[in-house]
């Protein structure tokens, strides 16, 4: 399944092979490599796992399959926002931890909503839409920054499932949670800030020419 984007690109025209290769590589990293198993022990690895899906696999899929989804403009942003917060609510995290079905439902929801979000961002047709896309990218960055702040500065452990599992990696559970916040803050914010600046520059340039 992880190799499906690359396989489709090999047989169908209109699918960009470079982004499809990147998407397959990101999915393999997220679900087949040791990173996936490491998410059981370290919540910081879980945070990195989500960044791979939202900021690498989903944008690559949106570029590989250049089709603007009809519900992407609103549904992508609100769906991605909902799944980001769900993953970080301790009660929802517990449900996903205890149920394979809920775990995969949340993974598919996160990846699918991120794909819809990036489809809207990358395939906006008018300059005004591209400028508006900057607002959505910044809103996403703001939510991720808030979640990162909660993880970094919380005085207590929010995800008790990782108690007793992090010590093998030289971290207590609270330090692991703080590291997850820093992972979301630095590797997560920099690509979004750069993309937002590029989209804003392109949108203003096209608007000035019309």
Image: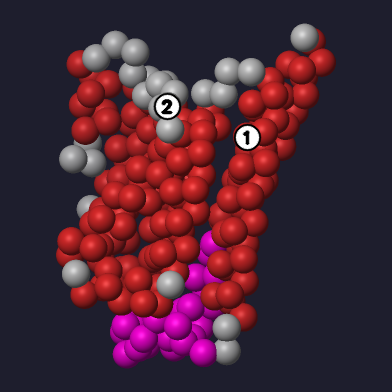
Q: Looking at the image, can residue 175 be seen?
A: yes
In the picture, which quadrant includes the C terminus?
Answer: top right
Give the residue at x 62% y 80%: 153
Q: Main secondary structure of the magenta part?
A: helix
Residue 133, numbered label: 1
Q: Position of residue 166 (x, y in %)?
A: 37, 83
Query: With 146 as the anchor, is 112 left or right in this view?
Result: left
The answer to whether any part of residue 169 appears in the image is: no
Whether residue 168 is in magenta: the answer is yes
Q: Determine if the magenta segment contains residue 133.
A: no
In the depicted structure, whether residue 208 falls above or below residue 51:
above
Magenta segment:
156-184
- Who comes first in sequence, dot 1 or dot 2? 2
Task: Identify the secondary structure beneath mark 1.
Answer: helix
Q: Is residue 78 above or below residue 131?
A: below
Q: Nearer the viewer, residue 184 or 131?
A: 131
In this rendering, position of residue 199 left or right of residue 110: right
Give left or right: position of 201 versus 173.
right
Write the residue at 23% across / 53% down: 32
Camera-side residue of 184 and 159: 159
At numbered mark 2, what does the secondary structure look like: helix, strand or loop?
loop
Q: Residue 29, position in %: x, y? A: 31, 50
- Whether pointer 1 and pointer 2 mark residues with C-beta atoms closer than 8 Å, the reply is no
Point out which mark residue 70 bears: 2
Depicted 206 relative to depicted 41: above or below:
above
Q: How far across and down, in percent of the image, does residue 123 sit?
A: 52, 23
Q: How far from the left and from the top, in percent, is residue 206?
A: 73, 16
Callout 1 crowding tier (Cα within 10 Å): few <14, some 14–19, many ≥20: many
């Amino acid at each position: 399944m992880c190799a499906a984007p690359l396989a489709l690109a090999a047989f169908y025209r209109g699918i960009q092979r470079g982004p499809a290769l990147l998407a397959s590589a990101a999915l393999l990293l997220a679900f087949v490599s040791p990173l996936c198993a490491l998410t059981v022990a370290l919540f910081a690895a879980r945070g990195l796992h989500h960044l791979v899906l939202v900021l690498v696999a989903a944008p690559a899929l949106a570029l590989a399959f250049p089709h603007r989804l009809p519900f992407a403009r609103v549904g992508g942003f609100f769906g991605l926002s909902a799944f980001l917060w769900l993953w970080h609510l301790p009660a929802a995290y517990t449900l996903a931890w205890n149920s394979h079905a809920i775990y995969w439902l949340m993974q598919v929801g996160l990846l699918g909503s991120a794909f819809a979000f990036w489809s809207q961002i990358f395939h906006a047709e008018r300059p005004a839409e591209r400028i508006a896309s900057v607002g959505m990218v910044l809103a996403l960055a703001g939510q991720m920054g808030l979640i990162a702040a909660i993880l970094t500065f919380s005085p207590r452990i929010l995800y008790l499932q990782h108690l007793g599992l992090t010590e093998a990696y030289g971290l207590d559970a609270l330090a692991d949670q703080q590291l997850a916040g820093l992972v979301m803050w630095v590797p997560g914010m920099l690509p979004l800030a750069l993309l937002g600046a590029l989209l804003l520059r392109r949108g203003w340039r096209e608007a000035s020419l019309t």
